Amino acid sequence: NHAQVGWVSTQSLIQILLELRANRVPDVVVFYDGVNDAFACYQRAEAGIPANEFNREAEFGLVRDLRRVRLMALGNPSKTALGRLAAAIRRRLRHESAPPPWPQPWTKAFGAQISQANLDSLAREVVRAYEGNARIIQELGRARGFRPLFFWQPSVFMKNALTDREQNASDQQQELLRRFALAVHAAVGKSAFLRDSVAFRNLDLAFAEDRGEIFWDWC
């Protein structure tokens, strides 16, 4: 994917389609993703979408309202320390509770309490979307004569012994992300399609017992 940040498996599928359309047929294609599929779902509480979809929503809104362009150029005040302080004071004066420590779409989808069943359901949807993309790519491989190989990315949440830097990377993430990553890990393990596929390797536990420093971020 030319080192693009945060690509999901659907974007990898589109990329191989574009290569095949241009008659650039490879011998072997390595797909190294999975974690980004999970993180994109974590951001929006919706499986099968690209990461940072809220950026595209904001950009679309800019096209329709030039006043937002000027505001965007000035920066988002709610992201500054002063903006966060003002929001906290406003909530205190209005006797409002602090927002939940997870992305707003989760609250819209599940309310103030997110159960393990909610997490497991979304995790299964992430894996189903990934499976669907893998199936299409395998069919393309058989039709056009290339061999696809799929590798699910590891994450810091599956590593048992963390270095100080890795612990910091883990601590910086919200607890809901850790719980969701574990739910996705379980869903991948329960996938009969992925388990039986000779083209798929789950690297989630590749560094589980490694005591050296592997991660600078959570994945």
Image (cartoon, rainbow, N blue to C red):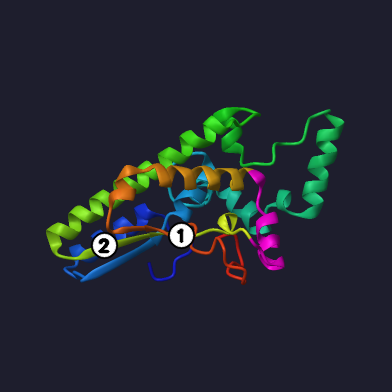
Assign the magenta stretch its main secondary structure: helix
Span of residues in magenta? 161-175
Q: Say which quadrant the C terminus sits in.
A: bottom right
Residue 52 drawn above or below residue 141: above
Residue 86 vs residue 141: left or right?
A: right
Residue in the picture at 68% in, 52% down: 76
Residue in the picture at 20% in, 64% down: 20
Residue 172: image tag: none
Number of marks in the rendered image? 2
Residue 79 vs residue 138: left or right?
A: right
Q: Is residue 15 magenta?
A: no
Tell me the residue that label 2 is attached to. 148
Q: Name the amino acid, label 1.
A: Gln
Q: Is residue 137 visible?
A: yes
> Closest to the observer: 154 or 72?
154
Tell me the residue that label 1 is attached to. 153
> Closest to the observer: 64 or 139?
139
> Closest to the observer: 36 or 17?
36
Residue 200 vs residue 122: left or right?
A: left
